């Protein structure tokens, strides 16, 4: 699926809301304001998924193979499979998104609901143009108390699910316009820190390479 089509679907999900399918609201329900700042020079972020969930929920483990759901984000910016998995498993309380690209140097704030047993957060998005790079907050506990705040600096992770050939045919988004998902393409086989853009294919490292961290994520408890 082309990324532009998926962006339209994600924007629609944003407008109607994901809901809290398997969890009842409680009296101690509150809100987190999650502000994501793109620290790169030339890599926009795809629509950002923010989820509140229960303890022990993680989107990935460093050094282990990426799940199909994580690969969908890292290769094509599609967080639909991960949001569905979290909701169907009954571990998610709320899932929200900014619904659009986040340009280098820009920030966006996403509001997401939380409650006593669901105060952990996962935040994730793809860097484009790349084969399978992504940013993440991976099951971090939210700040304590009213108006508490926590800052997480994210490097660029490599899902290891697709070769980093840097060919536009295999990279979605406005720069390349290629295909995202490539389930049979192989890759390094495990999640690791991304090595950046090397300039070996269609992408110039002078335009698209970066140094870590790539994203600043500020989490604030609103009420």
Image (tube, rainbow, N blue to C red):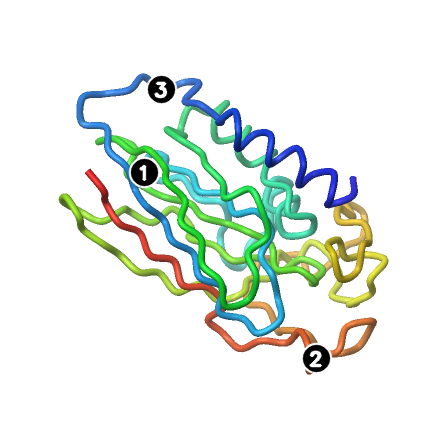
Q: Quadrant of residue 19?
A: top left
Crowding near the residue tagged with mark 1, few <14, some 14–19, many ≥20 C-alpha atoms within 10 Å: some
Q: Is residue 4 above or below residue 40?
A: above
Q: Which residue is mark 1?
A: 55
Which tag is nearer the camera, tag 3 or tag 1? Answer: 3
- Mark 2–mark 3 Cα distance, whole angstroms, equals 45 Å
- Mark 2–mark 1 Cα distance, whole angstroms, equals 39 Å
Q: Earlier in the sequence, mark 2 or mark 3?
A: 3
At numbered mark 1, what does the secondary structure look like: helix, strand or loop? Answer: loop
**Residue 139 x %, y %:** 38, 46
Q: Which residue is mark 2?
A: 205
- Mark 3–mark 1 Cα distance, whole angstroms, equals 14 Å
**Of all residues shown, which one is farthest toward the right?**
169
**Residue 90 x %, y %:** 42, 23
Q: Quadrant of the image for the C terminus?
A: top left
Q: Which residue is mark 3?
A: 23
Crowding near the residue tagged with mark 3, few <14, some 14–19, many ≥20 C-alpha atoms within 10 Å: some
In screen coordinates, is 217 left or right of 38? left
Q: Is the residue under label 1 in contact with that under label 2 (CB below 8 Å)?
A: no
Q: Earlier in the sequence, mark 3 or mark 1?
A: 3
**Residue 5 x %, y %:** 74, 38
Which tag is nearer the camera, tag 2 or tag 1? Answer: 2
At numbered mark 3, what does the secondary structure look like: helix, strand or loop? Answer: loop
């Amino acid at each position: 699926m082309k990324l532009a089509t998926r962006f339209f679907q994600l924007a629609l999900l944003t407008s109607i809301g994901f809901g809290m399918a398997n969890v009842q609201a409680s009296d101690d329900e509150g809100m987190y304001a999650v502000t994501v700042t793109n620290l790169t020079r030339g890599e926009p972020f795809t629509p950002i998924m923010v989820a509140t969930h229960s303890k022990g929920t993680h989107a990935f483990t460093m050094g282990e193979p990426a799940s199909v759901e994580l690969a969908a984000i890292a290769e094509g910016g599609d967080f639909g499979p991960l949001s569905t998995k979290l909701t169907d498993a009954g571990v998610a309380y709320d899932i929200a998104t900014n619904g659009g690209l986040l340009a280098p140097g820009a920030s966006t704030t996403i509001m997401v609901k939380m409650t006593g047993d669901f105060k952990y957060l996962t935040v994730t998005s793809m860097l484009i143009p790349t084969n399978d790079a992504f940013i993440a907050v991976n099951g971090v506990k939210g700040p304590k108390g009213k108006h508490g705040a926590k800052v997480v600096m994210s490097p660029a992770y490599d899902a290891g699910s697709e070769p980093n050939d840097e060919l536009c045919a295999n990279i979605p988004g406005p720069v390349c316009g290629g295909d995202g998902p490539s389930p049979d393409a192989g890759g390094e086989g495990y999640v690791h820190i991304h090595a950046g853009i090397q300039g070996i294919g269609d992408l110039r490292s002078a335009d698209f390479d970066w140094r870590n961290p790539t994203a600043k994520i500020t989490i604030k408890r609103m009420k």
